[in-house]
Amino acid sequence: MKNPFIDFHPGSYQIKERPTQRIIKEKQAVFNHIIKGYLDLVENEIKDLAWVVEHSRVVKAYGAAVEGLRDLQYDQAYIEEFCAELDGSNSIPYMIPGPAGLYVSALVNYSQESHILLGLGDYQRPFHFLGYGLPEGKTLTLQGDGGDFIGAGLNGGRLVVQGSTGNWCGAGMMSGEIWVDRHTGRNTGEWMQGGEIRVDGQIHGIGKTFFGGCIFKQGRLIASREVERVF
Amino acid sequence: MSLTGKDDLRKAAWQIHDYIRAELVLTRPDMDVKGMPFNSGLLMSFLIGLFQGKELIIGEPGLGKTTSAEYVCALLYRFPLGVIWRSEVAGHPEQTEEKIIGRPDLGKLNQGDEVVVWSYFTLLPVKIIDEINRLPETKQSMILDGVDRGKWEYLNDAIINQEFCLFATANYHDQGTNTIIAPLIDRFDLMVESKHPGPNLAYQIGIRDSNGLALRHEDLEDEFHQILSARLPYHVRMERVEEICGRFSETLEKGPGIRTLSSVERQAVRLQKEQIPFDLDSSAFLRLVLAELSFCHRFGQKRTHEVCEEGCHFTGYLCSTIQNCVSNRLPISVRSISQALAWFLGDETVGLEHLMAVLPHALAHRIQWKEGILAQSEKEARDDSLAIYMAKKAVKEMHRRYIEQSSQVKDALSIAYRIAEGEKVEPIRGDHPIYWEIMKDMGEVISER
């Protein structure tokens, strides 16, 4: 049969790349890079079949995540899209909450914007470790409830949670601020070295090991090196 | 003197067109092609006549439907008006095959011989059926084959016209008219409306000699009659007819000073037309049009008796507003007349402007709109008859859609070419029916039902 599209053979018509196509292509390439970085991280982390929260392991996973994102230009839209992919798509086969949260934190910490807003209420699965290592000059706002280890290792940034967090909020944070509209779970501020955690609702428990910084509950200072802990 | 050059032939064609427009058929311009004003009825009739098409001319009584066809035929085929008049068929309920096509030679029949006396209508290359919609529906099928292929049969004899064009006129519906049956109406390449020329031109018609007296020639008309009535083989008669046509053309040159085209020159013009290619945009646009007019996501294609439900995903396209599927005669008509227009305008390729001019007239009589759509449009302000107005509106809509995504459509067709050649490339998908049709051509089963 004669090719019915013969009028459009390459000799008479050449497909030109249009600006929109180029932009879409570039965007897709960046996003693919982000996905690949995550998959590489997960592949490395699941060798032991179980992912256990240990300080050294967290630091190593975060470091690997940062390494995967080196020199990549992206913004908040990519982070949101990645979170949505993690939450509901088949294109990412593994959603391991710990590494996933660390990877999102790395994305936030190295993104172009100084203020990032993530709508956690849009997702079905909990995200842990959000705000991990958030550096000075960055503000991360989480709309909805976060998982465990929210703001862990905070490093001078400002984390606002418009909802509640799970356990270990602000664990090991060094400096900066965490504002929580509602409640935090157990071990809030465990191994905390500096900065402030301000909770407007209830704190289910403060960490046993407390090196520095301040924790406020409903505006009242309840824990610091100078003040005896309430709990 | 014979005309041989491409431009000479075109110049002669223009001279005929302009003479009719200036002296015989006084009409207002109602369309614009590439910045040039034309009267759609006259322009399309002229192209139909020169390039052997078939045209349905609608309009109120007395607005020049038949007359304009007669003038076009007389000047393009070099027949005096008297010959044209004798060849015309009038549509009425008592019309018979014997009056339209041919009858037995009674003298010969008495001697036991079956000899057919063909009508002038059958013999001549110019065919005019006046008031075709007064032919009862059962009798319309008598002329289907002849209208389609120029093939006429009676008793055991047949004639195939080597060259022919056909014009049929139709009044708007009244008590004496019938519906033109779908297979017959689809055979018309174009439909045009013969419009009122406005009071000032109409006033001129009353006071000037615009009745085509220059196209009468009683002596030659008698000679034509003798040849056409002679018991000679068809081709012999036509050779002699052509010789008298040549003599009539000389009188036209001497009288009104019009250079007409011989049958050989007409043939040359048609060959030149056939060689005019479609440019990529017109190729892609026509495909898009055909997709909208034949596609049905639910039933695979449009069928008159199957109406897809409200709320179909493709509501924004024409497929959701029409009932029938366009036939394969549509692209044939559009291709031929668009090429004809490009030739007439001296263009090297058929482009979007040619298509935009021709498409409404190729679609107007072929689209069966859903009743609700007709009801919405019939009260809208307009300058054309409802069918042509709706076709123009539809073409404009499709053109807008094409312009919005022309690059993507062409890309999709280009990728489809490569896939059809065996290359492993991902096809381009989109929302418009054309993309879905391309996917079907690629062998994809559309399963989202």
Image (cartoon, coloured by chain):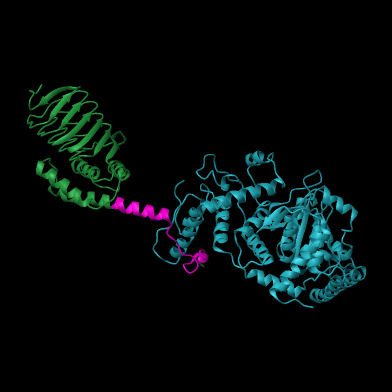
Chain colours: A green, B cyan
Please check the rendered image and state whether residue B285 is part of the magenta-colored stretch, yes or no.
no
Asked if residue B2 is positioned above or below residue B127 in the image, the reply reads below
Please check the rendered image and state whether residue A6 is part of the magenta-colored stretch, yes or no.
yes
The quarter of the picture where residue B8 lies is: bottom right
Q: Is B106 displayed left or right of A146 in the figure? A: right
Q: Is B17 displayed left or right of B437 in the figure? A: right
The quarter of the picture where residue B82 lies is: bottom right
Asked if residue B160 is positioned above or below residue A59 in the image, the reply reads below
The quarter of the picture where residue A180 lies is: top left
Q: B382 and B262: which one is in front? A: B382
Where does the magenta region start and end?
Answer: A3-32
Q: Residue furthest front?
A: A137
Q: B137 and A204: which one is in front? A: A204
Residue at 10% over, 29% down: A207
Q: A143 and A218: which one is in front? A: A218
Q: How many marks?
A: 0
Q: Is A91 displayed left or right of B95 in the figure? A: left
Q: Position of residue B23 (x, y in %)?
A: 83, 60
Split into 4 quadrants, where in the image is the C terminus of chain A? top left
Q: Position of residue B197 (x, y in %)?
A: 80, 51
Q: Position of residue B369 (x, y in %)?
A: 64, 45
Q: Position of residue A41 (x, y in %)?
A: 19, 49
Asked if residue B23 is positioned above or below residue A119 in the image, the reply reads below
Specify whether residue A214 is in view: yes
Specify whether residue A184 is in view: no
